[in-house]
Amino acid sequence: MKSSLKRVITALLAAVLLAAAPCTSAFGAQTYYVNDGDNTLALADAYAIGADGSTAKLPERGVYAATASGTQLLGGSEYENEQPNIPNGIVRVGLAFGSTALDAVHLQIKTGSGFAFGYYDSDRVFRSVGSTAESAVTVVADTNVTAGDSTFGAYHVQLGTAYASFDAAEAAARDRSGYPVFYNGTYYVRVGSYTTMEAASNSAATAYGSVVSGGARSVLVVKAGTDQILFGFDCGSTYSLSLAPQSGSGAAITQVAECKDRSGTRSCTYYGDFQFTRLSTQDPQKLTLVNFVGLEPYVKGVTPYEMSSGWPLEALKAQAVCARTYIASHMNGSPAYGFDVTGTTTSQVYYGTLDASANSDRAVDETAGKFVRYEGKLCETFYFAADGGATEDSENVWVTAVPYLRAVVDLYETASTDPGFYCKSWSTTISRAAVGDVSITYTPIGNAMTVTVGGKTYSKDAVRTFLTSVCGLRYNSRHFTVEYDAATDAYSVVGGGYGHNCGMSQWGAKAMAQEHGKTYEEIISFYYTGAYVA
């Protein structure tokens, strides 16, 4: 701020102070400062004084001065908000990969009809190369594999003619009882599915073509419950087959039989498209399954599983904004598998539309495009079930100190009277004779920092392992005490909460909304120090 401008403001303040002197209550109990030097004056709370003697707290960002009609930005600007890098607005979620990769994937459209065959390019744009009217299909590796009662082989007869379009190839395939295949960018017709080269060579179809085997990434789309092959996709490692469910109106919803919810009993349903890739050299028939879905539908598939869809709307809004910010901060998290995040607690729980409600969808819709930010940058929005009474500084949980991940005493959660708050408190006793001596240290806010038992020390987030492995507790957090009782020669372990204690407490968010009427912006600013929603 220039010195001349300071003098003008000083004069304005003096005049207003004199004019408002009889009305001392207008200034309340705040302390006011006038900066008449060349240094920068930093205030935790800055107030503007109007011409009538009234006061107003200045906005948190930017440099402002008081005017007769309100506040005015003097210099600089609001923080430039970072734009999330989500190519084409598409999020890639790993549904099955690595040890969970699948032998076959059964898709059933629940709302909509038919699939487009194609692939996603590097910009996450779907490129269609064909279609089917079938609404129930199975995808398998183009190798010797069994799906249900049908067996498919790695060998086929490929006819010699190349076709300019899918429709032309499909018409030719019908004449030869074969199927169209998209092979390295060109359409062909293949006939049969044989488990041996000899069987394929003995086929009458060899009169029109030659025996081929599918490449290492080749996959087949089959009519569900039959051995009828609808389409083959064989483009090497350049592209992977994707199926895009079609819908006349609204977004298509597809059930994936092999993807179960946390109970393990219900097949999940999803918005978006599905990509199939053979990645395992040890088990080449296995399919890595990735859901390509828009950002907002993805958030609708996270919110009701990370927080009950029946919870207060403002709490669900806070969860939706945190989930949206999390994915925006974790794009391309698993490049080896070709996806951004998993659908499990490794990233965020994601089961699609299964438990979504009008309430949880509304929370997403009413916060669409909103993110948690700190000085314009997207935040790392960690969250967990409950803190037991206090969250923790990030460097005391993991490694790095993050300015908005600061410890806060959580009286909202502590005072909650919700009868469903299952992990609000817990306790147990452990015998000193059984485990040895136990000692504990605490962080400045009162969470456990280290626990030493039997000569082994657990520190930071690992102290929760002490609770589960040594104490046998189901729920765990950083908020607990350990006290020795000489009369029983045992330790009393008493605490509350569930999770790593860094970021937003979900049960605390519920209490803030339900019992204190707080908005989702207030919830987020409480748990993420200095952060805001924009």
Image (cartoon, rainbow, N blue to C red):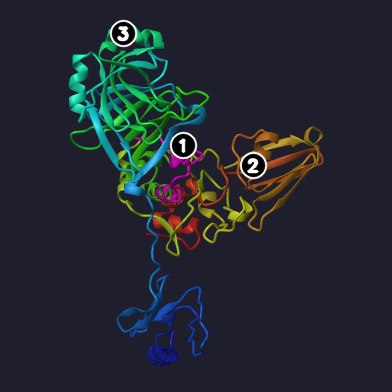
Viewer-nearest residue: 156 or 116: 156
Instruction: Identify the magenta region.
Output: 324-353
Give the structural element (helix, strand or loop) at label 2. Answer: helix
Numbered badge on residue 208: none
Query: Which residue is under mark 3?
Result: 203
Total numbered labels placed on residues in the image:
3
Residue 294 visible somewhere in the drawing: yes
Q: Is residue 520 left or right of residue 230?
A: right
- Dividing the picture into quarters, in which one does residue 229 lie? top left
In the rendered image, the quadrant that contains the C terminus is bottom left
The rendered magenta stretch, by its main secondary structure, is classed as loop
- Which residue does the image show at 50% across and 53% down from the upper left? 412
- Dividing the picture into quarters, in which one does residue 340 lie? top left
Query: Which residue is under mark 1?
Result: 337
Viewer-nearest residue: 496 or 11: 11
- Dividing the picture into quarters, in which one does residue 144 lie? top left
Does residue 168 sit above or below 195 in this rendering?
below
